[in-house]
Image (cartoon, rainbow, N blue to C red):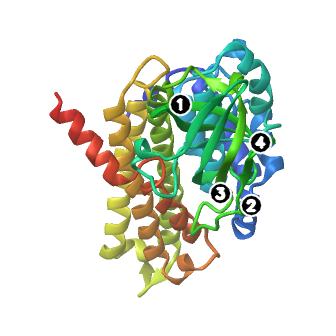
Amino acid sequence: MLSDSLFHPTSEHQLLREMVADFTRKEVEPQAEQFDREQRLNRPLFSRLGELGLLGITIPAEDGGAGMDATAAVIAHHELSKSDPGFCLAYLAHAMLFVNNFYYCSNTAQRAKYLEKVISGEWVGGMGMTEPGYGTDVLGMATTAVHRGSHYLLNGTKTYITNGPDGYCFLVYAKVEGRVTSFMVDRDCPGFRVSQPIHKMGMRASTMSELIFENCEVPTENLLGGEGKGITHMMRNLEIERLTLAAMSLGIADRCMEIMVNYAKQRISFGKPIAEHGQIQRYIGESYAATEALRALVYSVAATVGPDRRNRLGTDAAKLFGAPVGKQVADNAMQVLGGAGYCTEYPVERLLRDAKLLEIGGGTLESHQKNITRDLTRG
């Protein structure tokens, strides 16, 4: 067995897991099917994340956060995804893509304006990077910003933006004279609008839309870190994003393992529990091995990631290996459950739909293959 210290380096990490697991079981699980069906974010439940201190989990305590680390972020995403990966994705887009990213590239005045409201959950945040013609090729982005006196004029479109319909503030990347730059864009900035919600195969408990900028006026004080600093912000935050997405896959796999094992013990076929049939044993055995390998990888990498510690190779590896695990284990669980798994009687069909996004969002599998090969061949 793996050492418990890998998953709980401190007593605070153990208490965090117990708290999030209890919250997930009592409050997240009962609403998951409804909000997946209605394709909307449960805003009151999202505010509860703020009350629990989870929205600023990686922000220093002196600035109103929980003062915890990447392992804590992994724990939160791991546990929440056992019941509702869609809701967890909204949490990730807010707490990792916005709050964590914003904090480490903002100044004191910017933090004073935004931090309290996004850590409490009063404001929902998001991040605008992907564009209609530029997905994985983020450096090819076409959104531009031009300095005009007291403000910048932004023009362009961001797409597939989680929390778009619900968000008030967004960390947006645009090019200033060809250099990628980070901006804070509020919903009330003139020239900014959000499209109608984009409907999805899975992760339906989080909302998605385009962010559209038409001569959008962004105050100069909303420039983050200076012109041309966007690449640094982007690359640093991609690591914790990929790590927490891998943790979501682990949560999906854990839940599907639990469902299929319990079902295989109870379902009788040809006079005995189906767990005694070799075909079923293959699904369970291979799923367990893959899940435990992912658990070890995700938590090992989490110990090496922080604001001043980079591990792109490890986080790429965690997501490249991890994303398919959740999908495969969910698929195996559906096969074990048969018709029951295909119907909504069990959450397996929803978890399988949700799992597919993890092979695409936060970097496609192909992008991780490219990054890993490039890093290894550079020595």
**Amino acid type, label 4:** Tyr
* Mark 2 / mark 3, whichever is N-terminal: 2
Using the numbered discs, state the Cα–Cα distance from disc 2 to disc 3 in whole angstroms. 9 Å
Q: Nearer the viewer, mark 4 or mark 1?
A: 1
Q: Nearer the viewer, residue 182 or 273?
A: 182
Density class for disc 4 (Cα within 10 Å; few <14, some 14-19, many ≥20) is some
* Mark 4 / mark 3, whichever is N-terminal: 4
Q: Which residue is mark 1?
A: 181
Using the numbered discs, state the Cα–Cα distance from disc 4 to disc 1 in whole angstroms. 20 Å
SS for dot 3:
strand
Density class for disc 1 (Cα within 10 Å; few <14, some 14-19, many ≥20) is many
**Amino acid type, label 2:** Arg
**Amino acid type, label 3:** Met
**Place of residue 326 in the rendered image (x, y in percent of width and height, measured from the top left):** 44, 57
Q: Check contact, mark 3 vs mark 1: CB within 8 A.
A: no
Using the numbered discs, state the Cα–Cα distance from disc 4 to disc 3 in whole angstroms. 13 Å
Quadrant of image for the N terminus: top left
Density class for disc 3 (Cα within 10 Å; few <14, some 14-19, many ≥20) is many
SS for dot 4:
loop
Q: Is residue 295 left or right of residue 90?
A: left
Quadrant of image for the C terminus: top left
Q: Is residue 63 left or right of residue 202?
A: right
One can see residue 289 in this view: no
Using the numbered discs, state the Cα–Cα distance from disc 2 to disc 4 in whole angstroms. 16 Å
Using the numbered discs, state the Cα–Cα distance from disc 1 to disc 2 in whole angstroms. 31 Å
SS for dot 2:
loop
Q: Which residue is mark 3?
A: 208
**Place of residue 304 in the rendered image (x, y in percent of width and height, measured from the top left):** 40, 24
